[in-house]
Image (cartoon, rainbow, N blue to C red):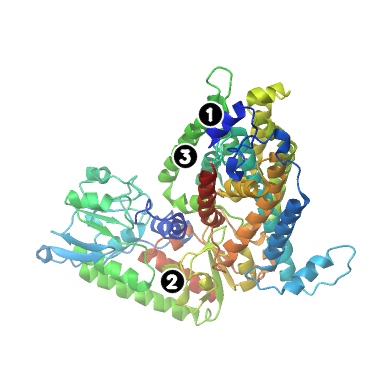
Amino acid sequence: MTVQRAARTRWARVSFAIAAAMSVTFAPAIATASPREPSGNVVTPAAAFPVSVTSGDGTVRIPSQPTRILCLSASATQMLYALGAGKQVVGVDEYSTYPPNAPRTKFTGAETNAEDYLSLKPDLVIVAYESGKVVQQLQLLKIPALVLPPAATFADVYSQLTELGTATGHQAGARRVESSMQEHLSLAVHAAGGAGRGETYYFELDPTYYTATSKTFIGAEFSLFGMTNIANAAGRSTAYPQISAEYLLKQDPDYVFLADTVCCHQDVASFAHRPGFNALVAVQRHHVITVNDSVASQWGPHTIETFVSLLAGILHP
Amino acid sequence: MTLAVASEVGKGKVPGLFDIDGTAGLPGPAPALVPTRLRAVHVGAGLAFLLGAAIASLLIGPADLAPGAVLGEIASKLPILHVHSSLSATGAVIIWQLRMPRLVLGALVGAMLAVAGASYQGVFSNPLADPYLLGVASGAGLGATIAIVDRSDLGHLPVDPLPLAAFAGAVLAVAATFALGRSRGTERSPASLVLAGVAVAAFFTAVQTFLQQQHTPSLAVVYSWILGGLSTAGWGQVELVLPYVGAAVVVLVACRRLLDLLNVGDEEATSLGLRAERARLVIIVAATLGTAAAVAVSGLIGFVGIIVPHTIRLIAGPSYRRIIPLSLLFGAGFLVLADVLARTVLSPEEIPLGVVTAFLGAPFFLVVLRQARRLG
């Protein structure tokens, strides 16, 4: 996406999508699970290469199995390690906090000069969005670059897993992660016992009432439990709309999730202190839940599974 | 256009600064003939516009409160009427804690930006001058960015540091502009001030962009602030800006005659007993402090400071004795109305207020410009 060309309005709308792509640090609360250790690590024989992977905005040809992967997307880092390509990773961006032993660098993924990355001698670069013309520059340098934009659905998550599996020679690993993720989600839904059905929720991205609708991967996680997003009516033109305090008061959701605890230091008390919010059902019933900002910006299997388990526990303690 | 005016002034013809009313090119109307007294019809129209915008802003919102019930709720708070409100408790909160402070804050910010814009245009003899000319916007932007970036490190503070940081940044930027604009001896000419303002704005923007690049996760929060808006308006913000905006507006309204005098040129103004340099300083300081306070709570809202004064010039003529008080009323009304649009066009989604004002303002400004060129 060419930021310079985008109109300011559009920039406002997409800025949250971009923020979603640039993930933030993990809260201890959701980083408790241990890194997934892939069992039965099946490596596709190198003869399967070259492969062509279609993702984001084009097809990328990868001539041989990558051994020096630079991953600048926290979500893709989680996927790579889950599907068994961790040993091929030589560097991850500073926001890739899971798994903890991933080789973190100072890169943010916002670098606009591909030359910055050359010191690691990568043979595959994975990004969540194109910063400047960096993907084009990498192509000129004969380094394949894969763009895996923010997922909007579980199907997007699974297809990114497949793409990464193909690109790294771990198709079987990708299939295994996908089915284990599906199993995890259905177990969580089962554990909730239908407790979320018909309940409404508001998911806050910042204190000016930017929010995520059902048409986002975080929204899809709530939809699993049959919960209804109060901001869907505002989501005609964007999945990350801005609503108002008044609309929130009128909708009076059953649950409130604050994902602006890191960026903007919001908590249950500061939320309840906003004018008129004391009367909200969610405040009265202690259904205001603080989560780390990253649950809305990371669509890797670890973040999704951890949040879905958390949600099941909240709905059906 | 401004140059033409300057030469006319030299010949003793005293038109207004902006000859969009067509008087400048014509053989000279004497100063006394330029209408300067406020006309009741203009003031009445301004009050009616503001009142209409205010009522719309109280009645319209995503909560669908019945207009009769809203008016009843407001009437019930008036001591004389003894009306009982039929509104629910939540409805009352929506009116008094959400819509009312949003209306008041919008009116304050709109009035401030329009009056400051008109004053800047007068002081700098430049029709393109807006309240952000001397670096207020870039300074506030940098201050806000620092607050947003650091917020994750600072932890919890008793007050929101964002508006304070934005205000401090804005004042610092303008102070830097003043310090730099002085380099040519002791005289601070409007032209060197404007150039210094451009340099300071570029520098502050560069620092802000650098910080943003270093802290990409805060990008969305910074942008949502820069685009401006009243979506989180509360009485706290009203209390925060009221002293600055109130004082600034009082000073600028009191200075409206001085602005007319400054327009005839420094030499003439001096011969009339005015210390041009000092008058200019007072006006700039007042306009800047008020604008900084407004920006601190509402973000960067563009074009209000340009389109409102220019529209008034077209309607009421070039005298600042009319432009300043009318900018106050129409600026307040315009921003309140723009905010109503910002929250209703895609309701329940909000559009950034700065987008609405620029969307309305930019085409309008081109029309004003075309008209000015034809007449000039």
Tag 1 and tag 2, C-beta contact below 8 Å = no
- Say which amino acid is labelled 3: Thr
Of mark 1 and mark 3, the one earlier in the sequence is: 1
Binning the other alpha carbons within 10 Å of mark 1 as few (below 14), some (14 to 19) or many (20 upward) gives: few
Q: Position of residue A40 (x, y in %)?
A: 22, 69
Query: Residue extending furthest front?
Result: B27
- Say which amino acid is labelled 1: Ala
Of the pair B212 and A266, the residue shown nearer to us: B212
Q: Position of residue B290 (x, y in %)?
A: 66, 41
Secondary structure of the residue carrying numbered label 1: helix
Identify the disc placed on residue B205.
Answer: 3
Q: Position of residue B295 (x, y in %)?
A: 60, 46
- Which residue is identified by label 1? B191
Mark 1–mark 3 distance (CA, rounded to whole Å) = 21 Å
* Image height of B173 relative to B229, above or below: above
**Image quadrant where residue A158 sits:** bottom left
Q: Determine the chain carrying the residue at label 3.
A: B
Of the pair B304 and B45, the residue shown nearer to us: B45
Residue in view at x 30 percent, y 72 percent:
A178
Residue in view at x 64 percent, y 28 percent:
B12
Q: Which one is closest to the eye, mark 2 or mark 3?
A: 3
Q: Determine the chain carrying the residue at label 2.
A: A
Secondary structure of the residue carrying numbered label 2: loop
- Which residue is identified by label 2? A215
Binning the other alpha carbons within 10 Å of mark 2 as few (below 14), some (14 to 19) or many (20 upward) gives: some
Query: Residue extending furthest top?
Result: B185
Q: Which one is closest to the eye, mark 1 or mark 3?
A: 1
Q: Determine the chain carrying the residue at label 1.
A: B
Of the pair B99 and A264, the residue shown nearer to us: B99
Identify the disc placed on residue B54.
Answer: none
Q: How many marks?
A: 3
**Image quadrant where residue A218 sits:** bottom left
